[in-house]
Image (tube, rainbow, N blue to C red):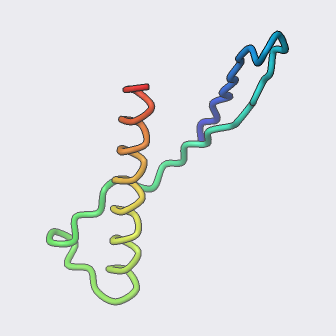
Amino acid sequence: MIQIAVLQRWNDGGETKYVKGMLKIVDLAGSERVSKTESNGNRLEEAKRINKEITTLGKCINLLAQA
């Protein structure tokens, strides 16, 4: 797991404000290729969730990179 501390600072009418957050990145065992693993049942559902989370993470990283 990787942890990244994010600190945002801005000036609001003469007062400096801060917001701190933590971004935790966890290895989800890689992309699951259902066609190659021939997964079914619970394993298939887990693979779907992993793929969805990897896609969501990629979208978040892209949006942060554009900001």
Q: Quadrant of the C terminus?
A: top left
Instruction: Tell me the residue at 22%/64% (across/down).
Output: 33
Out of 47 and 18, give the one closest to the viewer.
Answer: 18
Could you tell me how many numbered marks the image carries?
Answer: 0
Task: Reply above or below: 41 against 59.
Answer: below
Instruction: Tell me the residue at 68%/37% (across/down).
Output: 22
Q: Position of residue 1 (x, y in %)?
A: 59, 42
Q: Picture quarter containing residue 6?
A: top right
Out of 11 and 3, give the one closest to the viewer.
Answer: 11
Which residue is at the far bottom? 41
Task: Reply above or below: 3 against 65.
Answer: below
Q: Is residue 66 left or right of residue 37?
A: right
Which residue is at the far left? 35
Q: Picture quarter containing residue 10?
A: top right
Which residue is at the far top? 14
Instruction: Tell me the residue at 74%/14% (across/down).
Output: 11
Which residue is at the far right? 15
Q: Position of residue 8 (x, y in %)?
A: 68, 23
Q: Position of residue 37 (x, y in %)?
A: 22, 72
Q: Is residue 45 left or right of residue 23?
A: left
Q: Is residue 38 left or right of residue 7?
A: left
Instruction: Tell me the residue at 68%/28% (across/down).
Output: 5
Task: Reply above or below: 44 against 32.
Answer: below
Q: Is residue 1 left or right of residue 13?
A: left
Q: Picture quarter containing residue 41?
A: bottom left
